[in-house]
């Protein structure tokens, strides 16, 4: 197991402990709580399917944030992009009666383009005017929120004030075959879309020139520019692809897990994408695993709440705590370093290491703080 | 038109004040060199802790105004305490400040509802009595200004304006303010001059947490009346106001007033003949679009603290 994975696992572990402490403090039994929490997501085939379905939009929003991160961009605009992408797909689904085999792929493409279009604004503002993408993305979130809110209310209103008309079954990603396989769960073809996206993004990042250029811009803008890479073009493309992925999350959420779009709420999956990406060390595969874990927590919390008195928000609290521990992973890494060093030190005979140390420029006796020179030589973790 | 202005003014001010105090706290935070994107979460924490203490006090002692004063103080304390998480991560551990702030937002939203559900069952905290509006004697009879500023005002409005005046003075006219600003512009120079950069940044973050907590509680007692686990994105709007206002106290006063008016107009536009024909969606997105345009306009001459968002590292010179 690599180091980043280990740090993420420790963050998860600490987050679960924090969750147990919160349960204890509010007078609940954490063992029973966790038992029902995990059983709720795995106990039957149907629950397992629901867990996978809950994870699907998280995989895509996590992938979106991770992809932008690799180009050095913080895509906090995933809620807005997801909402707008899902909205575009819903509009196509509601206003055309093409056969399912044409309509559904068309909706997926529209969702991607909608999200990409929405993310292009912060991308262009960043590239051309050097406006910080975090601030402009937050503005775009609220712009998307209100555009979708009023357009759905005016043209696509459904049975309730807070949602659109229902999509016909032929205009959703649902597949009776897959549902039956998982005992009637609401799992749908969105999962395949998400896994395909993970594979494609992993390929782009690791195997293509484009991915190499994106990562170079992320590592060092100026060096990339010096190397003949167009920084501005890459920033805009990176934002657009990230936005497109978030748009896909909207499609799988509103035309897969649900069959209409909810208005008046920011989709929580958007911000959760940041958590997924961070826990997954900003890699596609890591995001996939992190999303599955968060999906498990989210889909099990209802069962836990039904069986015990513990409020379902414990799952959200655990996730937020994990993110805080992941954000402060420096602390964990320092601790790991100390443990590894003390192990090495005990393995070697004392005299040997002392001799080695005197020969070594990088003197470190373990009990002295590093000198200024040494601090500069410490390799920074790859970002 | 004048009559309409007069009618919506108190509402616009009620919207402005929580934004203003939160943005002022964030101004201290960013001027000391720490980006605080967790404002929304800190406001939620303030709204929750203040609301809970007001509820308990009013149940025990009846709804006299001092209960709300105590609630505001509790909100400030808890907000400041909660912001320590952000300070520790971004100052001691040199973590990514945007990520740490995001974690604060998520944690506040989840934890407060979790606790509220344990306490009230529904997860909402409804205040028995909110803050009442007051007319200020004598001043309220001044023509033009009187009806606008001194009728139907909340005591918190004047408290926040007083804090704004004091903290503007501190920022620009005291050596503490100069030191704090130096830490945000050029921390290495500040450190060389003998300023403890870490300590200054801690102070900045804690002020931000306390003011955001106060802002969240003011939002609760004047604007919403009920805690439900969010502050309707006010924290993000305060962040926008800070940047739109170019990290200057009077700038954020102007931008938060603008946000207050723009939002109030969009809320009541149906009853104002001049605005009734404009589709609501334009009025709703108006403040955000204007902020985006302002970001573009200011991008060349941005007054952002130069070191904001950069962890301070002694070894990096």
Image (spheres, grey):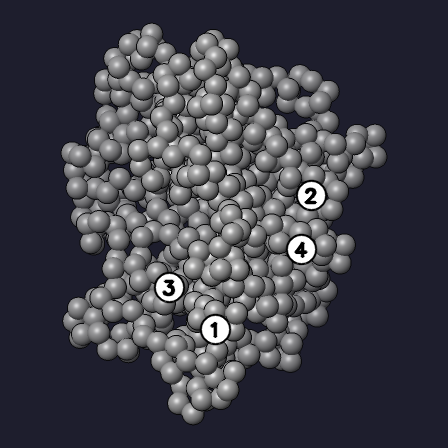
The secondary structure type at the circle numbered 3 is helix
Q: What is the C-alpha distance between the residues marked 2 and 4?
A: 12 Å
Q: Is residue B14 visible?
A: yes
Q: Position of residue A348 (x, y in %)?
A: 54, 32
Instruction: Provide the chain ID for the residue under circle 1.
Output: B
> Which is nearer the eye, A107 or A354?
A107
Instruction: Provide the chain ID for the residue under circle 2.
Output: A
In the rendered image, which residue does mark 3 sit on? B223
Q: Position of residue A82 (x, y in %)?
A: 49, 33
Residue in view at x 70 percent, y 61 percent: B303
Binning the other alpha carbons within 10 Å of mark 1 as few (below 14), some (14 to 19) or many (20 upward) gives: few
> Which is nearer the eye, B279 or A120?
B279
Binning the other alpha carbons within 10 Å of mark 3 as few (below 14), some (14 to 19) or many (20 upward) gives: some
Q: Nearer the viewer, mark 3 or mark 2?
A: 3
The secondary structure type at the circle numbered 2 is helix
Q: Nearer the viewer, mark 1 or mark 2?
A: 1
Q: Is residue B142 left or right of residue A116?
A: left
In the rendered image, which residue does mark 4 sit on? B294
Asked if labels 4 and 2 touch by Cβ distance under 8 angstroms, the answer is: no
Q: Nearer the viewer, mark 2 or mark 4?
A: 4
Q: Which quarter of the rendering shows the C terminus of chain A?
A: top right
In the rendered image, which residue does mark 2 sit on? A125
Report which quarter residue A300 is drawn in. top left
Q: Position of residue B56 (x, y in %)?
A: 21, 66
Asked if labels 4 and 3 touch by Cβ distance under 8 angstroms, the answer is: no
Q: Which of the two labelled residues, at mark 3 and mark 4, occupies the earlier sequence position?
A: 3
In the rendered image, which residue does mark 1 sit on? B3
Residue in view at x 74 percent, y 46 percent: A129
Q: Residue furthest bottom?
A: B138
Binning the other alpha carbons within 10 Å of mark 4 as few (below 14), some (14 to 19) or many (20 upward) gives: some
């Amino acid at each position: 197991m690599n180091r980043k994975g280990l740090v993420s696992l420790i963050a998860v572990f600490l987050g679960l402990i924090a969750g147990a402490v919160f349960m204890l403090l509010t007078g609940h039994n954490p063992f029973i709580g966790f038992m029902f929490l995990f059983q709720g997501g795995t106990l039957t085939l149907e629950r397992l399917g629901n867990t996978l379905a809950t994870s699907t939009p998280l995989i895509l929003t996590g992938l979106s944030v991770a992809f932008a991160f690799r180009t050095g961009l913080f895509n906090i605009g995933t809620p807005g992009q997801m909402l707008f992408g899902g909205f575009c797909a819903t509009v196509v689904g509601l206003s055309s009666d093409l056969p399912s085999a044409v309509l559904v792929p068309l909706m997926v493409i529209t969702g991607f383009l909608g999200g990409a279009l929405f993310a292009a604004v912060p991308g262009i503002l960043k590239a051309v005017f050097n406006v910080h993408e975090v601030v402009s993305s937050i503005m775009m979130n609220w712009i998307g929120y209100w555009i979708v809110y009023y357009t759905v209310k005016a043209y696509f209103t459904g049975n309730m004030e807070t949602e659109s008309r229902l999509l016909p079954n032929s205009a959703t990603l649902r597949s009776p075959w897959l549902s039956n396989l998982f005992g009637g769960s609401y799992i749908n073809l969105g999962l395949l879309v998400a896994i395909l996206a993970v594979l494609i993004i992993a390929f782009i990042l690791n195997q293509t020139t484009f991915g190499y250029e994106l990562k170079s811009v992320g590592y060092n803008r100026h060096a990339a520019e010096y190397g003949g890479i167009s920084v501005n073009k890459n920033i805009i493309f990176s934002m657009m692809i990230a936005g497109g992925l978030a748009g896909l999350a909207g499609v799988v959420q509103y035309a897969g897990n649900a069959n209409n779009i909810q208005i008046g709420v920011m989709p929580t999956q958007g911000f959760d994408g940041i958590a997924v990406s961070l826990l997954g060390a900003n890699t596609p595969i890591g995001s996939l695993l992190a999303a599955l874990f968060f999906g498990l927590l989210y889909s099990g919390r209802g069962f836990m709440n039904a069986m015990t008195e513990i409020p379902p928000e414990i799952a959200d609290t655990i996730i937020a705590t994990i993110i805080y521990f992941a954000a402060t992973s420096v602390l964990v890494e320092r601790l790991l370093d100390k443990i590894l060093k003390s192990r090495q030190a005990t393995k070697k005979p004392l005299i040997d290491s002392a001799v080695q140390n005197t020969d070594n420029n990088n003197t470190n006796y373990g009990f002295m703080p590093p000198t200024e020179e040494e601090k500069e030589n410490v390799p920074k973790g790859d970002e | 038109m004048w009559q309409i202005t007069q009618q919506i003014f108190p509402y616009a001010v009620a919207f402005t004040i929580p934004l203003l105090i939160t943005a002022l706290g964030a101004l201290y935070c960013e001027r000391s060199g720490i980006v605080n994107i967790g404002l929304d979460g800190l406001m939620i924490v303030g709204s929750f802790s203040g609301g809970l203490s007001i509820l308990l006090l009013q149940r025990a002692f009846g709804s006299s105004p001092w209960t709300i004063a105590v609630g505001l103080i509790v909100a400030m304390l808890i907000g400041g305490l909660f912001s320590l998480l952000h300070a520790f991560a971004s100052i001691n551990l040199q973590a990514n400040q945007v990520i740490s702030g995001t974690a604060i937002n998520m944690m506040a939203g989840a934890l407060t509802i979790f606790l509220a559900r344990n306490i009230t069952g529904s997860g909402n905290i409804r205040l028995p009595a909110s803050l009442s509006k007051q007319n200020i004697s004598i001043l309220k009879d001044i023509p033009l200004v009187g009806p606008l500023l001194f009728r139907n005002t909340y005591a918190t409005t004047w408290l926040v304006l007083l804090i704004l005046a004091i903290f503007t003075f501190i920022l620009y006219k005291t050596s503490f303010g100069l030191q704090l600003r130096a830490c945000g512009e050029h921390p290495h120079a500040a450190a060389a001059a003998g300023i403890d950069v870490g300590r200054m940044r801690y102070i900045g973050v804690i002020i931000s947490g306390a003011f955001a907590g106060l802002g969240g509680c003011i939002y609760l007692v004047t604007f919403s009346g009920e805690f439900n686990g969010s502050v309707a994105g006010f924290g993000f709007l305060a962040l926008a106001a800070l940047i739109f206002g170019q990290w200057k106290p009077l700038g954020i006063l102007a931008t938060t007033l603008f946000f207050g008016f723009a939002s109030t107009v969009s809320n009541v536009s149906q009853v104002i003949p001049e605005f009734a024909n404009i589709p609501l969606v334009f009025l709703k997105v108006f403040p955000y679009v204007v902020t985006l345009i302002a970001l573009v306009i200011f991008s060349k001459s941005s007054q952002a603290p130069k070191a904001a968002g950069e962890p301070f590292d002694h070894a990096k010179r």
